[in-house]
Amino acid sequence: MRYVYCIAFDGDGFIMVFNPKRNGWEMPGGKVEEGESDLEAARREFREEVGHDMIEISSKEESPEVTVFAARLGPRVDGGEMTWRRFQDLPERLSFPMVEYLPLIAWAREQVFSSATR
């Protein structure tokens, strides 16, 4: 089974969703459904959870099971299923260990902001 998630920026803040099942903040994402590409799954999950499209910038395969996308927040398309916020720094209550987020946020920030100056 494959998974995808997106580190999307709105201005210089990144978007996280609150997952009540895990009682913590995490990046929007989920499972890749049969017949979907990783990018299609990431866009769908982002729309479902945040209610916005994402403007894809770059991708990084973290493992054979997970692809991470760096993106910018796109236009609103509906309400979204989860509570989301923009953060400058990681919040205290996370769904997964902080060490899993830090290098990927740095990578995504570099992808998004260096592409804006190219």
Image (cartoon, rainbow, N blue to C red):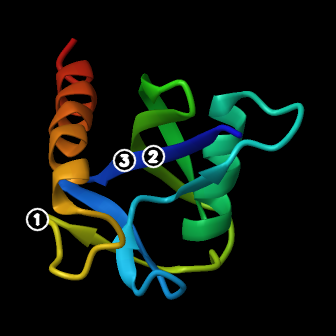
Identify the residue at horizontal 56%, vertical 42% (top origin): 4
Q: Is residue 53 above or below residue 118?
A: below
Extreme residue toward the right, this view: 35
Label located before the other in sequence (3 or 1)? 3
Q: Callout 2: few (<14), some (14-19), or many (20+) C-alpha neighbours within 10 Å?
A: many
**Mark 1 surroundings: few (<14), some (14-19) or many (≥20) residues within 10 A:** few
Q: Which residue is mark 2?
A: 6
Q: Is residue 97 left or right of residue 49?
A: left
Q: Residue at x 27, y 57 (%)?
A: 14
Q: Quadrant of the N terminus?
A: top right
Residue 50 horizontal/vertical position (percent): 54, 68
Q: Residues within 10 Å of mark 3 (few under 14, many from 20)?
A: many
The quadrant of the image that shows the C terminus is top left
> Amino acid type of disc 2?
Cys
Identify the residue shown where x is 63% and y is 45%: 43
Label 3: which secondary element = strand
Q: Nearer the viewer, residue 71 or 75?
A: 71
Quadrant in the picture for residue 76: bottom right
Q: Amino acid at mark 1?
A: Asp
| Residue labelled with disc 3 | 7
Q: How many marks?
A: 3
Residue underneath mark 1? 89
Q: Quadrant of residue 71?
A: top left
Q: Quick check: marks 3 and 2 in contact, CB under 8 Å?
A: yes
Give the structural element (helix, strand or loop) at label 2: strand
Q: Report whether residue 11 is seen.
A: no
Q: Residue 16, relative to residue 114: is it above or below?
A: below
Distance CA(mark 1)–CA(mark 2):
16 Å
User: How far is the residue under mark 3 from the one under mark 2?
Assistant: 4 Å
Q: Quadrant of residue 61?
A: top left
29 relative to 18, above or below: above
Q: Residue at x 18, y 22 (%)?
A: 114
